[in-house]
């Protein structure tokens, strides 16, 4: 939940700053919102024979494919499924499986058929895809290398199918790569596959939706309310429209007589407008600082799972454990670097802070 601060709330008077407003974030993320965003993931490009293109972290060139997040919200791909066969047909009587059991059935299928099916593991930040960006998976058949290395391979000179399934087993995206694809050429799935065959009407629907959203906000501000409540005002908008709305909201509060209370999952909006940030997680206030302090003093320490035991629990605000490493959110850059010189120390952005706080809360 995000609040634009003004003088309307006297209990925040001690934080008054001209032209500055307070952002409140409630990290109670709607599962349905994430589910809808996952359904907007699409296979983007596929390269079956890679002799001179992408190189993985081990210095190898292998087949790869991109998954594009066409939504305007970050999407976590963990526990989604990628296969080279139609899992719904390959699994006996799949359509008769109860909805509550389909995830379990898909997991079992991936476990028993790693040469054609892969479940994206939990606990890897690389599988979180930012809005309107892509993530690259390497089809090298070596899933132990990392979450972005799938357990199957693609075969040059043959037709290759790729299926992307949601965590509940629903098909999200499909692409058929022709056998005629030349070496070092990428197949543009979004422009050349089934998923591109959408009506041009979709573009007009999106434009009309954007206009309607902007008009609704303008109409609400026309009454000059002391308190304006907005739910995801920039959700689903293109970057230009989102920027225009944020500019309008900033102008609306400049006189110090208005407050805007809004909810958002788009952390880039916070980077754009926030001066003070208060983070609520599971009903508890976890952080209440100025944004500059948050970005300068809150850090991520990285190391091996064994090294995590060397840290004192009171120094850890949140932690995300992975198979071969961990990421711990801490506060006090200089103090932490002096106390734990053996760890890698990285700056943390708002989105990463939220993820690690939630990971810490879950564990």
Image: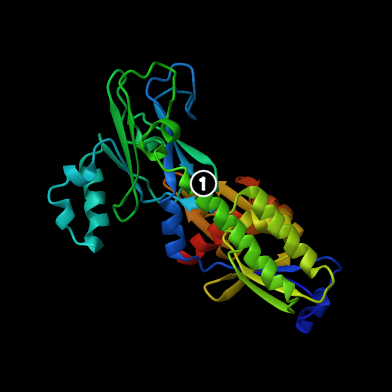
Q: Which residue is mark 1?
A: 203
Q: Is residue 6 above or below residue 155?
A: below
At horizontal 32% and vertical 19% (from top left) the residue drawn is 156
Please rate how many residues cluster around mark 1, counting C-alpha atoms within 10 Å: few if below 14, some from 14 to 19, many from 20.
few
Between 128 and 299, which is closer to the camera in this rendering? Answer: 128
* Residue 235 placement, left or right of 8: left
Residue 164 location, x and y as percent? 34, 43
32 or 205: nearer the eye?
205
- Looking at the picture, the colour scheme in use is rainbow
Instruction: Return the x and y of residue 40 as percentages of the image width and height.
Output: 44, 49
- Residue that sits furthest to the bottom in the current view: 10
Q: Secondary structure at mark 1?
A: helix
334 horizontally vs 209: left or right = right
Residue 22 horizontal/vertical position (percent): 73, 69
Taking depth in this image into account, of 220 and 65 the one nearest to the observer is: 220
Q: Quadrant of the N terminus?
A: bottom right
Give the vertical position of 115 relative to 53 (above or below): below
Query: Looking at the picture, does residue 1 appear above or below residue 304?
Result: below
């Amino acid at each position: 939940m995000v609040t634009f601060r003004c003088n309307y709330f006297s209990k925040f008077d001690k934080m008054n700053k001209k032209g500055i407003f307070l952002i409140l974030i409630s990290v109670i993320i709607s599962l349905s919102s994430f589910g809808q965003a996952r359904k907007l993931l699409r296979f983007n490009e596929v390269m079956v024979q890679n002799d001179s293109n992408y190189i993985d972290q081990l210095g190898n060139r292998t087949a790869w494919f991109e998954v594009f997040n066409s939504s305007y919200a970050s999407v976590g791909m963990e526990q989604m499924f990628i296969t080279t066969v139609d899992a719904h047909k390959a699994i006996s009587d799949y359509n008769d499986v109860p909805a509550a059991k389909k995830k379990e059935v898909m997991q079992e299928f991936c476990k028993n058929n790693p040469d054609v099916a892969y479940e994206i593991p939990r606990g890897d930040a690389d599988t979180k895809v930012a809005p309107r960006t892509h993530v690259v998976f390497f089809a090298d058949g070596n899933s132990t290398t990392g979450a972005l290395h799938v357990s199957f391979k693609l075969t040059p000179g043959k037709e290759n199918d790729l299926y992307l399934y949601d965590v509940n087993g629903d098909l999200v995206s499909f692409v058929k790569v022709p056998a005629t694809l030349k070496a070092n050429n990428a197949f543009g799935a979004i422009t050349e596959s089934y998923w591109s065959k959408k009506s041009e009407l979709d573009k007009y629907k999106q434009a009309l939706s954007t206009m309607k959203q902007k008009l609704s906000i303008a109409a609400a501000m026309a009454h000059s309310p002391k308190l304006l409540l907005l739910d995801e005002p920039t959700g689903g908008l293109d970057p230009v429209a989102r920027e225009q709305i944020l500019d309008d909201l900033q102008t609306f509060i400049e006189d110090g007589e208005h407050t805007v209370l809004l909810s958002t999952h788009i952390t880039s909006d916070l980077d754009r407008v926030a001066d003070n940030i208060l983070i609520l997680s599971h009903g508890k206030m976890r952080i209440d600082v100025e944004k500059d302090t948050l970005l300068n003093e809150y850090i991520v320490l990285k190391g091996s799972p064994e090294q995590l035991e060397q840290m004192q629990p009171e120094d850890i605000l949140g932690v995300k454990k992975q198979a071969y490493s961990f990421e711990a959110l801490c506060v006090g850059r200089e103090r932490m670097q002096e106390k734990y010189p053996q760890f890698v120390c990285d700056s943390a952005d708002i989105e990463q802070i939220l993820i690690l706080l939630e990971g810490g809360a879950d564990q």
